[in-house]
Amino acid sequence: MQSDIRRLSLILLFAPFALWIFLLIVLPHIGMIALSLREKVAPRVYEFGFGNYIDFIQEPIYWNTLLRTGSMSILVTFLALLIGFPIAYYIAKIAGQRSKGALFLLCLIPLWVSDLIRAFGWILLLRETGVASTFLQWTGAIDQPIEFLYNDITVVVGLVYTVILFMIVPLVSTLDGMDDAMVEAGYNLGGSGFTVLRRIIIPYAMPGIVSGCIVVFMLTAGSYLTPILLGGKNSSWFTEQIYDQFITRFNWESGAAFGFLLLAFTSLVVWLGLRLTGQTLANTVAKS
Amino acid sequence: MNRRKRAATREKFMTRNFKITGLVAAMMLTTASFAQAETLRLLTWGSYAPEELVQKFEAMYPDINVEVTFSNNEEMIAKLRATGGAGFDLAQPSHDRIHAAQLEYDIYKPMDLSMIDTSVMESSHLEGVKANTTIDGEVYAVPHQWGTSGLMANKTMAPDFKGWGDLCDPQYAGKTSMRLKRTILLGTAFSMGHDPFAAYADLDEYQSILDEVAEKLIACKANIKAYWKGGDDLSAMMLSGEIVASETWDSTAYKLYGQNKDIVFVPPETGALAWIDTFALPRKGKADDAAYKWINFVLQPENVTIMSGSTGAIAAVKGGLELLPEDKRNAVTAAFTAEDIANLKFFANIPPGVEDMEGKTLERIKAATGG
């Protein structure tokens, strides 16, 4: 009787999650795989085949864009970690109990505005006749208006700004659990600030770092608006290729194949990252 | 109670019960039709369903509710393809986007022209659209509004701007813009002396034209400030003077003319590219009558003026130009001469396969590191 009730409650608790995963993640993906393995031979006539994947391999533009997207996403992840870590450390360890909440809220506020509006904010600031350029001219630092928009650096800045919160939140929650005594012990034993950071704080924060990096990397590689709006003449982003395949070229089959390739590629990068840093999902993400 | 009597009571009870059920069902049906006042789901371009007109229409037909979804050519087809033509009752793709989409995805249904007051339509547009969208003797679309794609220039800063090729003229280096879509491919092809629409018949020849165009546009990249993506960023660049000329939709140029009289639409010397946005019925649309009512409603002269005021395009009705609001009419007359109108190049039906070829070419241009 008791075990029946326990089993029932387990099933009931598990059901929403299972339904969500199955109906909204697994099923659509199966549909996408099926779609990506169809080759169009004539209007309304399709055949099974790997043509869409072969097209991808044969066309350097596609895999170059994918590699570009991947490397820029890694750069964004790294920058987000570099900037996010001190902020998270300050919020978790240095700020007082009262200001902690306020600081955390300040980090959250940008998320209340949609991606689109934030991108337009950057456009207003950085365009040739925008705030930054006008201000620099006013101070006399430059005498010609400068265009900050439409290049890769702007895209990276915009992306770091968009995703940094997803780095800070897991870091704060891991660092919050760290006992101050550990840091003190490190100093008492004669460790320098750098040694304490390297030997005590970072290893302790590892679960947060890993989960933050994974989330940020995935979000960046899959982002669409920021790279499109801030990017310039040469900045292709892989999601743009997927959109083009689906919408402007009516080529859902190859769009689906591209979607899958992006998923496979980002998963591979995450796996490689874990391997290279000697981490596993079990002792990092599952812990945080 | 004996058996027979009981049976009789039961029978009586049952008949009464049936009556009640019938009554309830009837009531439900009537309330349902009241509550559900027919809904007309429009799939159209931003600004093609101005609030003023929607309210006027709903006041005229109180039992029709209008729901509007704003979109563009490609998304309209993608949306209808996803559902096999369900979810909307009236769509407004351009005239060149119907034939192939219908052949490939079967997303529209034939129109009943007797339901539409075609006598008010400009006959050249009506016949053109009919010719473009007739499949197996059935007509799939009628014209609504037409406009052009061409160039715009700030007269004070680029007085001699007159052709597609001028976008790549080094004297305007860093001061021009274009949208990286098929329009610029076609425009550039015309400016290089080709006729891309004629080449649709021979796709090998079209590919060789596209290769030439790609080469030219890649070399041109250094000259371009940025590719614009929508009317808003184009307007901002043009009004702020960051660019002096651009490839554009005429309606965007007319809007800017209203704010700065120096910015005019320039029909390219090889002819502006003309499109006609149409009315087409999605295959699984559920409110055809309401759709026909909307079509006839927006074709009435006083409504045409409201519509054109919002869209900036010219209605495909007789005297469409005179029915434009005054500011738009001034902008059009400032831009077009009668020769320009005679020189319009109407977009030809896109045969299957061309979208893919053009898409690849555009990708090549975007990925090239020209500037």
Image (cartoon, rainbow, N blue to C red):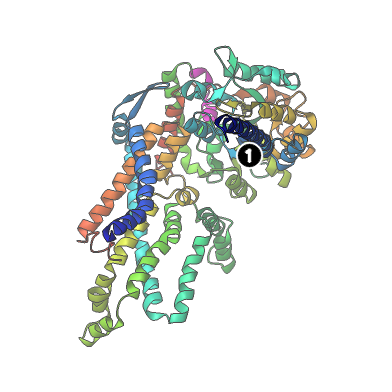
Relative to A76, A204 lies left or right = left
Q: Position of residue B225 (x, y in %)?
A: 52, 46
Residue B195 in view in this figure: no
Relative to A254, A136 lies left or right = right
Relative to B142, B204 lies left or right = left
Give the camera-side residue of A100 and B1: B1
Asked if A274 appears above or below B135 in the picture, the reply is below
Q: Chain of mark 1?
A: B
Q: Does the segment drawn in magenta span residue B187? A: yes
Asked if B220 appears above or below A168 in the picture, the reply is above
Q: Amino acid at mark 1?
A: Val
- Which residue appears farthest toward the front when viewing the image? B2
Residue drawn at (75%, 32%) of the image: B304
Q: Tag 1, which secondary structure? A: strand
Q: Position of residue A136 (x, y in %)?
A: 55, 65
The N terminus of chain B is located in which quarter? top right
Q: Does the segment drawn in magenta span residue A23? A: no
Give the camera-side residue of A36 and B151: A36
Q: Position of residue B30 (x, y in %)?
A: 68, 34
Say which residue label 1 marks: B68
Residue drawn at (60%, 37%) of the image: B248
Residue drawn at (38%, 71%) of the image: A88
Q: Main secondary structure of the magenta part?
A: helix
- Which residue appears farthest toward the bottom when viewing the image? A188
Q: Quadrant of residue B342?
A: top right
Give the camera-side residue of B143 and A66: B143
Asked if B35 appears above or below B188 in the picture, the reply is below
Badge 1 crowding class, 10 Å Cα cut-off, few under 14, some 14 to 19, many 20 or more, is many
Q: Which residues are magenta?
A: B186-200
Q: Quadrant of residue A164?
A: bottom left
The C terminus of chain B is located in which quarter? top left
